[in-house]
Amino acid sequence: MIQQSQADRWRAAAALLPPHLRGPALELDELRQARAEELRLRAGRPMTAVYPEGEESIRGTAVTAADLPLVLEIATRASVHTAQAQISGGFLTVPGGHRIGICGSGVMGEGRLRNLRHLSSLAIRVARAVPGAAWPVLDKLWQGGQFQSTLLVSPPGAGKTTLLRDLIRCLSDGDGCPALRVGVADERGELAAMWEGTPQFDVGRRTDVMDGCPKEQGLLMLLRGMNPQVLAADEITAPEDCAALEMAANCGVGLLCSAHGLDLEDLKARPLYRNLLERRVFRRLVVICRTKEGRSYQVTELC
């Protein structure tokens, strides 16, 4: 595993920018670099940095329409065509776990979105590891010495992936809990950030990662081939994902997943998650709330 400081990760994210935007990003003071969560590029506007309290324009920057495809060229090392499947899904994950969100004009074919062209904006999410992020909730996810299947819930940008990653590390290393074998279905490469077979984030010594394939397939491949004690996946969004999770739960495997939502009532109002709750696939719910003082966690025992 390659260890990187927060400064290293900021520099790696800034390296995706064209030179005339990269310089101002690297000139931000150390505190801003450490706190920035995203870089936002919108054609015809200044580039902005996103902080917990909001967006702030970066002085001396003016984003042009030509800058946006250039970022993708840099990110893919001039091989944009090889990343077309991801780009058509509206995002691109790059080495180090940084993720580029993409907006533009959709190109349809056979009833499906095939490509994005005439790009209008990009969001570069800076990948960050926060060792210890799991400690406020870790001891609440056990009962009778057994890990209880857990679903993490929050709106976008509140820290689900960061918390999930550190929970995986703790379970795998036995940091504050018994050590378990963890299988990670990392469809978008944000949890482990695999690069040539090596995780760029610390996801623990007993963790096996299935990277870059749909969550449903990755979960089932890990279940059948790696004998996990816990299966983890980020952002459950499809019925196929839920079916794979239910199969794993019926095999006695613990689950550790995340989903977009506000709270338990919000999940119950949506059929996809209501079915998981009614079938008792998860035993704990962690709701992440973001305040001016930081993040707070509400842990609910579901059954």
Image: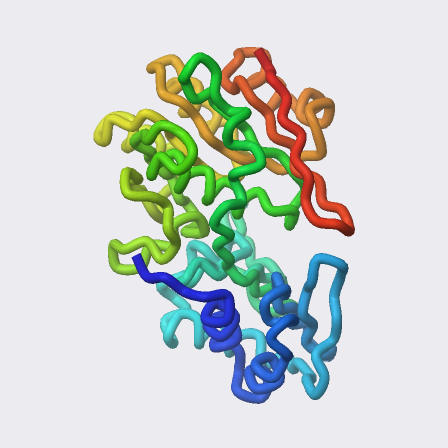
Q: How many labels were placed on the picture?
A: 0
Q: Can I make out residue 57 in this image? A: yes
The part of the image, by quadrant, that contains residue 287 is: top right
The part of the image, by quadrant, that contains residue 178 is: top left
The part of the image, by quadrant, that contains residue 269 is: top right
Residue at 76% of width from left, 46% of height from top?
A: 291
Q: Nearer the viewer, residue 277 or 115?
A: 277
Compared to residue 74, the image places residue 181 above or below, namely above
Where residue 113 appears, as percent x and y from the top left, is: 53, 51
Which quarter shows the N terminus? bottom left
Q: Is residue 171 left or right of residue 6?
A: left
Which quarter shows the C terminus? top right
Where residue 16 appears, as percent x and y from the top left, is: 49, 74
Residue at 33% of width from left, 31% of height from top?
A: 179
Compared to residue 158, the image places residue 120 above or below, namely below
Where residue 120 appears, as percent x and y from the top left, is: 65, 69
